[in-house]
């Protein structure tokens, strides 16, 4: 169903598309497929609802988001199960994602009350300056499938908190998760038109409408760098406000002063999270040559112990890839690396999993002797492959880590505080984990440099993306 102007309804012309379980291939739902008429209706509803929603007190907006937080936490189990079925991650990881998603609702219900202006000393004694923060207007939001609930709340919560209204297009592979989020917003009494949902199998016209329709003030996108660039190009002639959360190619650097066993444990946990389908997934593991053997031994042992399968099955620690093209891309990265001289320590091919249907499973893989000439060293793999590259000194590894068009996340393992600080300053990435494999939280700004995006989500910065600063100069 589409959710437009407070009503659940079918698409114009009753078009639909199917969504399926990547662990089995089985169809799990049929969803209304929004076309241009529906997109226009959603933008019209959001536009009509804007001034009243923007005019509500921050306390009213905060209360709605707070209630949505509570309902999402109450529904954690149901949402997690649906997420596992539709997206594939193991149930435990799905529960964690629902909590992370709910955290954005809570954080921005609080931030709604902290949208402060300022007073500024003026150069003339008869002049006063003040600034006011106002919502930008109607927001067009586009989200990916890999974190199908938290990527929705990370946009919708700050937009609503700021006083904006929203039209959201979720990923084609995960519309059911987005529908559940909007059911929550509906149930907690969000006024009609304030948040609208338009699942579709054809994203192109939506992107065109969001970037060109004069009623849309801001476009926020999370997805691939490739599509982000298309939208940025489309938005430019219309001077739309935009923010982009795009792809990554994270370096994971382990120095000789770190514990290689502890670092390998961290590397395995963060690499295989969500089957490697995370924008902050390490795509290059730089390990000091003097500790590489211990690191690889531990990483290979831990990787071999992972259990691939349907995320609903007890004991499964790594789920399927989302679709066949994703599986083909992972295979291509492995084959290219092996052909160019990489050592295949474990994995390297599609995994056989017992159970009904056909899933897109790939064996968790560790590659050694990886070099800069291999495709995997510079393209986002988005799959369960850990490529290990050896290095000798700090300057060399900083240069190699920064030698990428991407700039989202980086990880460093070291027991030297000074080195940790040097690396934090020298690495050109937006999010840096120092001996930490989860440098993310609703309260911390998330976003990339270079081709990984523009803008930040979460934290104090997250709501600023939906606000305009207005300056008032008063002669008194
Ligand atoms: P994608 O192919 O770029 O799709 C993302 C969204 O854009 C989907 O909703 C998709 O719709 C839509 N889309 C595709 N083409 C479009 C167009 N021409 N106009 C408007 N919308 C369009 O990316 P994905 O495969 O879903 O997600 C994986 C990528 O997202 C990875 O690169 C990952 O690193 C990145 N990501 C980044 C972050 C971050 O915070 N930086 C977080 C999560 C993921 P359809 O589903 O219908 O194709």
Image: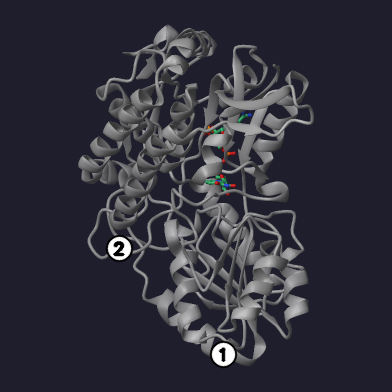
Determine the residue positioned at 77% across, 63% down. 403
Pointer 1 and pointer 2: residues touching (CB < 8 Å)?
A: no
Secondary element at tag 2: loop
For residue 173, say whether it is visible.
Answer: no
Closer to the camera in the image, 289 or 5: 5
* Mark 1 lies within 8 Å of ligand 1 (Cβ measured): no
Q: Which SS class for mark 1?
A: helix
Image point 58% across, 32% down: which residue?
A: 220
Residue located beneath label 1 in the image: 293
Classify residue 238 by image quadrant. top right
Q: Is residue 314 visible?
A: yes
Circle 2 residue: 316
Q: In the rendered view, does 30 fall on the left or right side of 42?
A: left
Q: Earlier in the sequence, mark 1 or mark 2?
A: 1
Q: Can you give x and y, in whole percent of width and height, for residue 198 in the image?
A: 45, 21
Cα separation between marks 1 and 2: 28 Å
Q: Is residue 222 above or below residue 184?
A: below
Q: Position of residue 222 (x, y in %)?
A: 56, 39
């Amino acid at each position: 169903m589409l959710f437009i102007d407070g009503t659940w309804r079918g698409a114009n012309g009753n078009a639909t598309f199917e969504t399926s379980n990547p662990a089995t291939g089985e169809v799990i739902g049929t969803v209304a497929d929004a076309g241009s008429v529906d997109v226009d209706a959603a933008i019209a509803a959001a536009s009509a609802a804007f001034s009243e929603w923007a005019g509500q007190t921050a306390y009213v907006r905060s209360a709605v988001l707070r209630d949505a937080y509570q309902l999402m936490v109450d529904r954690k189990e149901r949402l997690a199960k649906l997420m596992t079925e539709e997206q594939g991650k193991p149930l435990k990881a799905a529960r964690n994602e629902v909590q992370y998603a709910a955290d954005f609702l809570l954080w921005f219900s609080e931030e709604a009350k902290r949208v402060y202006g300022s007073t500024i000393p003026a150069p003339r004694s008869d002049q006063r300056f003040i600034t006011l923060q106002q919502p930008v207007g109607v927001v067009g939001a586009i989200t990916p499938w890999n974190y199908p609930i938290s990527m929705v709340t990370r946009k919708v919560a700050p937009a609503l908190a700021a006083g904006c209204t929203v039209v959201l297009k979720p990923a084609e592979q995960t519309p059911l998760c987005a529908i559940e989020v909007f059911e929550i917003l509906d149930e907690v009494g969000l006024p009609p038109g304030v948040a609208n949902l338009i699942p579709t199998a054809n994203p192109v016209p939506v992107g065109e409408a969001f970037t060109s329709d004069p009623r849309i003030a801001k476009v926020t996108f999370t997805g691939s760098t490739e599509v982000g660039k298309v939208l940025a190009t489309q938005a430019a002639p219309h001077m739309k406000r935009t923010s982009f959360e795009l792809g990554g190619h994270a370096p994971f650097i382990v120095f000789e002063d770190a514990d290689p066993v502890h670092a390998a444990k961290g590397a395995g946990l963060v690499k295989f999270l969500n089957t490697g389908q995370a924008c902050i997934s390490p795509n290059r593991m730089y390990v000091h040559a003097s500790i590489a053997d211990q690191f690889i031994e531990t990483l290979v042992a831990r990787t071999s112990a992972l259990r691939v399968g349907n995320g609903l099955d007890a004991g499964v620690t790594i789920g399927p890839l989302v679709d066949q093209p994703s599986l083909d891309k992972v295979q291509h990265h492995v084959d290219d690396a092996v052909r160019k001289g990489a050592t295949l320590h474990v994995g390297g091919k599609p995994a056989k999993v017992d159970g009904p249907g056909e899933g897109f499973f790939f064996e968790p893989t560790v590659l050694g002797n990886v070099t800069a000439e291999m495709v995997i060293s510079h393209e986002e793999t988005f799959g369960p492959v850990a490529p290990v590259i050896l290095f000798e000194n700090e300057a060399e590894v900083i240069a190699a880590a920064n030698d990428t068009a991407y700039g989202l996340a980086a990880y460093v393992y070291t027991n030297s505080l000074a080195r940790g600080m040097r690396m934090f300053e020298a690495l050109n990435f937006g999010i840096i984990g120092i001996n930490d494999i989860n440098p993310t939280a609703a309260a911390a700004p998330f976003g990339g440099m270079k081709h990984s995006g523009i803008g930040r989500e979460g934290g104090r910065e997250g709501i600023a993306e939906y606000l305009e600063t207005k300056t008032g100069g008063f002669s008194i």
